Structures are given as C-alpha cells and as structure tokens.
Image (cartoon, rainbow, N blue to C red):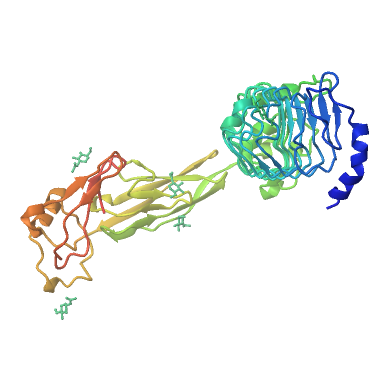
Amino acid sequence: MAVFPLLLCLLPLAPASAPPQPATSSPCPRRCRCQTQSLPLSVLCPGAGLLFVPPTLDRRAAELRLADNFIASVRRRDLANMTGLLHLSLSRNTIRHVAAGAFADLRALRALHLDGNRLTSLGEGQLRGLVNLRHLILSNNQLAALAAGALDDCAETLEDLDLSYNNLEQLPWEALGRLGNVNTLGLDHNLLASVPAGAFSRLHKLARLDMTSNRLTTIPPDPLFSRLPLLARPRGSPASALVLAFGGNPLHCNCELVWLRRLAREDDLEACASPPALGGRYFWAVGEEEFVCEPPVVTHRSPPLAVPAGRPAALRCRAVGDPEPRVRWVSPQGRLLGNSSRARAFPNGTLELLVTEPGDGGVFTCIAANAAGEATAAVELTVGPPPPPQLANSTSCDPPRDGDPDALTPPSAASASAKVADTVPPTDRGVQVTEHGATAALVQWPDQRPIPGIRMYQIQYNSSADDILVYR
Ligand SMILES: *[C@@H]1O[C@H](CO)[C@@H](O)[C@H](O)[C@H]1NC(C)=O
Ligand SMILES: *[C@@H]1O[C@H](CO)[C@@H](O)[C@H](O)[C@H]1NC(C)=O
Ligand SMILES: *[C@@H]1O[C@H](CO)[C@@H](O)[C@H](O)[C@H]1NC(C)=O
Ligand SMILES: *[C@@H]1O[C@H](CO)[C@@H](O)[C@H](O)[C@H]1NC(C)=O
Ligand SMILES: *[C@@H]1O[C@H](CO)[C@@H](O)[C@H](O)[C@H]1NC(C)=O
C-alpha cells in the first residue's frame, strides 16, 4: 500500500546511496546499504519495507541483514549461491514459510536469526546444509513442532539454540541430546509438560539452560545438574557456572524433587504449585524434609467377580499416593499382565480381559507402586460355564455332528475344519490359510451354501504374544 509511493520518491535517491558497483558485483538492492568495496562484503536492509528477499543480492556477501521487514517466505532461490555468508538476520519479519533447502548453500553460515516470525513448524529439510551454524535463534515464533531431523546438519556445531517463546509441547529430546557443543539452550516460555530423564546428560558444554515458564510439574535428575552445587553462582563463582532457570513452572514439590532442592541456591524465584500445603511457597525456602511422597493406598477394587466363559471381564483397582501410583496386574499364575490380544491394562488401573476362558479364573493381584512404596490388593474372578444360546432356534436346525455351533466354547482347530468340510461340496473342502506372513494370514472357507443355524465362526490361533490359544 504505502510501499509504492515510497519507492517512487526514493528512486532519485537510490544512485546517491548506492555508489556505482564494480562490474563483478550485483547492484545494491534499493533501500539497502551495501559494503561491497572491501571485505567483508555486507548487505544491510533493516526496516526497509521489503516484502521479499531482494533478488539482486551480491551473492558473495558475508553479512546480510533483513530484520524488521515484511518478508513472508524464504524461497529456495532467495539465498542460493551465498556460500560465503556468515551472518543472516531475518528477525521480526512475517515469515511463515521457509522452503526446504532454502539455506542449503549457506555452508559457511554461523548465525541465523529467525526470531519474531510466524513459523509454526520446522521439518527435516528447512535447515539442511547449515553445517557450520553456531547460533540458531528461533524465539518468538509459533513453533508447535520441531522435526527430529531438523537440526541434524548443525548438531555438531550449534552453540546457542534459542527456542523460547514458542508453542512447543514436545521436543525431539533425543536430537537435542546430541548437541554436544551447545552452550546456551533456551526452552523457556513454551508448553513443555515433561522432560525425559537424562535428556541433557550428554550436553557437556551446557552453561545456561532456561526452562522458565513451561508446564513442568517435575524435573528428573540429570547428570548435568551434578555440576550445579559446585558451580551455581555462589559469590565469586566462575563465569562458566551452569545456570539453570526453571521458575514459572507448576512444580509439584514431593520427594522426587529433593535432589533439586539439595542443590541449595537462594537467589531464584522458583515456587511450588503443589501439594496444597506447599503451594505458592518459594522452592528454596521449603525445607528438604518437607519434600515428601505418600506411599500408595488401594482405595477401590472390584468385588469378587463371576462371568460366563467367553464374556469380557473388567477388574478394577484404584490407588492413591504421591506421586500417582502406577498399577500393574499379576495373573493367578503369577504372570505380569500387559496389553495383549486378550487383555488391556489401562493406566487408570483397570484390567480388561477381552474374552474369558474357563481356565482364567482365580485370584488376580493388583500392585500399585510409586517412589515411596507399593500396595497390593486381590480380586477374585470366577469364570463359569458359557451361557446357553439365546438367538438361535435350536429346535429348527440340525446341529452339526461336532457339537452345538452356537456354543462359545470353541472346537479345536481340527474339528473346525472338519466341520466346515462336512458341509461343503467335496471339490473345495476345508479351510485354506494363505498369504501368511509374520503377523497376518488370510483364512478362507467356502460358505456358498447356507448352513442352517450357523451365525458365527470361531477362529482359534496360537499367538506368540499370549503363549496360549486365542479364540475369536
Ligand atoms: C547460482 O549459481 C548457479 C550456477 O552458477 C546459477 O545457474 C544460478 O543462476 C545461480 N543462482 C542465483 C540465484 O544466483
Ligand atoms: C495398553 O493400551 C492402552 C491403550 O489401549 C494404554 O493406554 C495403556 O497404557 C497400555 N498399557 C500398557 C501396560 O502398556
Ligand atoms: C479406565 O480406562 C478405560 C479406558 O480408557 C475405561 O474404559 C474405564 O472405564 C476406566 N475405568 C475407570 C474405573 O475409570
Ligand atoms: C423357532 O421355533 C419355533 C417353534 O419351535 C418356530 O415357530 C419359529 O418360527 C422358529 N424361529 C426361527 C427363527 O426359526
Ligand atoms: C500353541 O503354542 C503352545 C506354546 O508354543 C504349544 O504348547 C501348543 O501346542 C500350541 N498349540 C497348537 C494348537 O499349536
């Protein structure tokens, strides 16, 4: 809008501000200042009203400043051939889109400033080729996703990574853990709810880690933090001290954070959000002995249950404790039960047996455990005989020789195929299993001729995940 008249009135000035160029170099883009007479070559266009990266850039430039413009995207050709560029600033534009490979020629680039833009994600290809990058500033964008491979090319050189003021709920922690040269890591003002244990253990050069204002309720101990008590800013500490900032998180001050409290610093504003008794108190003012956990107590469990064979059963066990206990189930035979084709163990403590079998009955044990201890409770399950058929009209059909087709108690695999074989023409008898792979198989049987009374088929298979026969 305003750009057009502005450019018009500036046109006469352009020759004055851009001296004649040597034949080998491109003309200085309008409204930019260029230093192309001597090394290092620079192109400076801050606040120049640019809507895109000027096409007439001197490709030999070592410094390119394009901050405070209105550039909305960085295209593949915009920075092509700038193999000598050391410093690139694109801060405070309106960049939403960076083409894959847009920086691929910037092999020498040391600093890339992309802060204050509108990036929502960074994929595998966008930072490709930045094999010498030291400083990567991505703060104040809207980043919600950072691909695991996004930093691959600069993983060994990166010293300063600023991801602050974004919308990150997740990070590719494994990839971050490989930034062996990183010195400053800014993760503050995001939406991170957890940090995996050991995330920073290989960042031996880390000197500043900012996790302020996220959603962390706890921080797992990390070998990195063992440097804190020695180096953390007592008077006269060396400038290289590790600085860890984690204020503005809803810290849950239980025994899992004692390790952090033991690092005893008194100069920060971190506070506890919970448990209620400690809510709002300064982290460093809470006594070590007040960081307590509660061992689990089982508060609810299913009463003795009886189900007919073939039906599902849900066994419930609810436990409280601090931290939230994890509930596991042990079968009457003493086997730990997880998710399988026959059972689901949910985080809320419910164990679902999808199809019960006569042998499934017995006393199941739920074990609730947390950092402070464990508690167990027993739930008894009785698996009765299968229910009588209800829908079929047993008087109106001839049951096949091998037994009642409606019964939920399965026939053996051999009898299933025999039974089907009995009722089909001799030309294509039997069950065919084809296309079998490691995890799937196609089971076919002829059913052209309606078989009176049959309303379901059962398939019986041996699953290595269960170690037992499974019926469907
Ligand atoms: C980059 O260099 C190649 C090969 O010299 C050339 O074909 C291409 O036009 C150049 N691109 C730009 C944007 O200068
Ligand atoms: C079993 O699967 C459910 C989702 O179906 C999941 O929530 C649960 O954590 C899994 N349990 C185990 C023990 O892996
Ligand atoms: C536990 O979670 C499962 C799956 O989300 C749900 O079906 C079940 O009702 C839950 N049980 C309780 C007691 O909340
Ligand atoms: C079930 O049997 C009764 C008589 O015993 C008969 O009247 C009825 O039609 C049958 N129903 C079906 C669905 O075959
Ligand atoms: C199923 O597998 C178990 C354990 O490998 C084996 O003992 C059993 O005989 C198998 N059953 C069939 C029908 O193959």
Q: Is residue 274 left or right of residue 235?
A: left
Q: Is residue 113 visible?
A: yes
Q: Is residue 183 visible?
A: no
In percent of width and height, residue 148 lies at 57, 35
Please identify the quarter of the rendering in which residue 136 is found. Answer: top right
In percent of width and height, residue 308 lies at 26, 60
| Residue at 80% in and 42% down | 50
**In the image, residue 120 above or below residue 130:** below
| Residue at 85% in and 40% down | 47
In percent of width and height, residue 96 lies at 69, 45
Q: Is residue 412 left or right of residue 269?
A: left
In this rendered view, identify the residue nearer to me: 185 or 46: 46
| Residue at 32% in and 49% down | 342
Please identify the quarter of the rendering in which residue 159 is found. Answer: top right
**In the image, residue 319 above or below residue 101:** below
In this rendered view, identify the residue nearer to me: 94 or 240: 94
In percent of width and height, residue 446 lies at 16, 56
In this rendered view, identify the residue nearer to me: 177 or 311: 177
